[in-house]
Image (cartoon, rainbow, N blue to C red):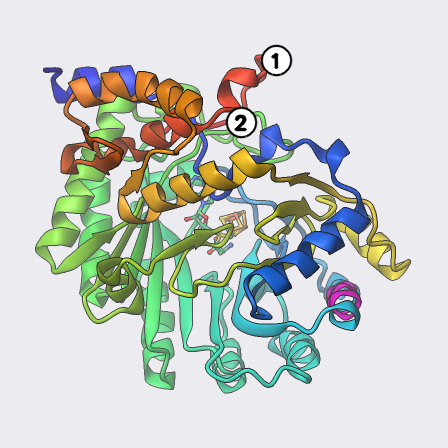
Amino acid sequence: MESESSLIKKYNIPGPRYTSYPTVPYWESENLSFETWNETISKNLTHFKTNEISLYIHLPYCESLCTFCGCHKRITKNHSLEKPYIQALMNEWDEYNSSFPFKIKELHLGGGTPTFFNPDNISILLEHILKNNKAENIDFSFEAHPNSTLDKHLSTLYQLGFKRLSFGVQDYDPIVQKAIHRFQTFDQVQKVHQNAKEIGYTSISHDLVFGLPKQTLMAIEKTVKNTLLLMPDRVSLYSYAHVPWLKGNGQRGFEDNDIPNDEEKRALYELAKKMFLNAGYIEIGMDHFALEHDSLAIAFKNKSLHRNFMGYTTQNTNMLIGLGASSISDSWFAFSQNEKEVEKYVQMSENKQFDKIKGHLLNEQDLIIRRKILDLMCHFETTLPEDEELKKSIIKKLIPLQEDNLIELKEDNLKVKEKGIPFVRNVCMCFDTYLTKSNDDKPKFSKVI
Ligand SMILES: C[S@@+](CC[C@H](N)C(=O)[O-])C[C@H]1O[C@@H](n2cnc3c(N)ncnc32)[C@H](O)[C@@H]1O
Ligand code: SF4
């Protein structure tokens, strides 16, 4: 049997995060026209016999660039861009709303930085979107940058129905903050966290990242200790995704050798994980922790956890509509991604030109494998497919993981063992038929750990 460090050497290879299957680099856009995309939405509505959707709204602007960031964002201090962007989002929503009878069950504002926007502008947008939406108990959430979250953001969004938010924290160590060009003190985070609690937010999450440039065990220990002083209901402990080939992400604010190596990175995660578990958190899926009372922890225990482009969610809708530049929508039978460049997106929306899409139409085999990968990412278990050829090829790829005691394979049932959880993306990769189809060697994914 292999030691922990040789397992890391063996399995820490580039691999997808599986927020979708097939993953974006393998989409076959030529097979998806605008008409076909709309047909898949109609198919979803009749197939699942519900019109409930999750709605993701991408708000891309940030005032300052964090040099570790892999998100789709646009750095600017020009707040006059807010209004045209909000109008573009409303146009896009109207286009969907005039064709489909959607009922919003879950709504998430992500970014970029949603709190870059003036609370009044966010209010205009949401009142427009929600005016014909009579659904009750919508699960609203937003991403908040501690440095730009005003009391007015917290109160306005609370009145609109938001009870959940996540603060981007990353790391409290000043040396790490300098390396990633992201400056915020514990006092700043504590202040907005406590304000949100006092206003009545019932689920507050903090985003932390392990494996950042210049991050040491001492730095992460201090970061987790500070986090535990506030006991957020949820914590996302993201693995730093080093993707310097992404256009415009500015990840050259530090040297490559400032980044912890594979084993050091693993040790950072193990230390943080141990501290969260000792403090009463439950580990959920990949990268997440939650206190027992939180709905994510309850959904994980009940096996009702779901995963989509927004990450883990308790709302098991089968359709996700993404509004805004770079947003991805998922009709279960197809994926479609909006124009990534913010200016082009705004221009296209002004011209009501929504017919140019990039995406993927899922075939029968994609649909089967997507379900298996979703099971693995949410519950760490699944069954093997019925198709004998496909099953054989998957088992062949799973054997090394079984020999390394990372999984348990009994007849057609597959379970990821405790020791295998850090390697769940490697397990999913055994089901992914596209990885071997690649016809170029351009880098596509960050490493799995
Ligand atoms: C859109 S940002 C959150 C909102 C706001 N922009 C902020 O920074 O506070 C989403 C989160 O993605 C995570 N993230 C960004 N780039 C990442 C990377 N390269 N690797 C891992 N996590 C990353 C960070 O934890 C960040 O808080
Ligand atoms: S981490 Fe947040 S604030 Fe920083 S650049 Fe990325 S999206 Fe913007």
Q: Residues within 10 Å of mark 2 (few under 14, many from 20)?
A: some
Q: Is residue 110 found inside the magenta-colored segment of the image?
A: no
Helix, strand or loop for disc 1: loop
Q: Is residue 92 found inside the magenta-colored segment of the image?
A: yes
Left-right relation of 264 to 138:
left
Mark 1 sits near ligand 1, with its Cβ under 8 Å away: no
Q: Which one is in front, 33 or 121? A: 33
Q: Which residue is mark 2?
A: 244
C-alpha gap between disc 1 and disc 2: 18 Å
* Cβ atoms at labels 1 and 2 below 8 Å apart: no
Residue 22 visible in rendering: no
Left-right relation of 436 to 294:
right
Residue 237 in picture, x, y percent from top left: 31, 47
Q: Amino acid at mark 1?
A: Asp
Q: Residues within 10 Å of mark 1 (few under 14, many from 20)?
A: few
Helix, strand or loop for disc 2: loop
Residue 57 in picture, x, y percent from top left: 61, 62
In the figure, residue 22 lies in which quadrant?
top right
Q: Which mark is residue 440?
A: 1
Q: Residue at x 54, y 83 (%)?
A: 160
Q: Which residues are magenta?
A: 88-96
Q: Residue at x 22, y 31 (%)?
A: 411
Residue 359 in picture, x, y percent from top left: 68, 40
Left-right relation of 68 to 323:
left
In the figure, residue 165 lies in which quadrant?
bottom left
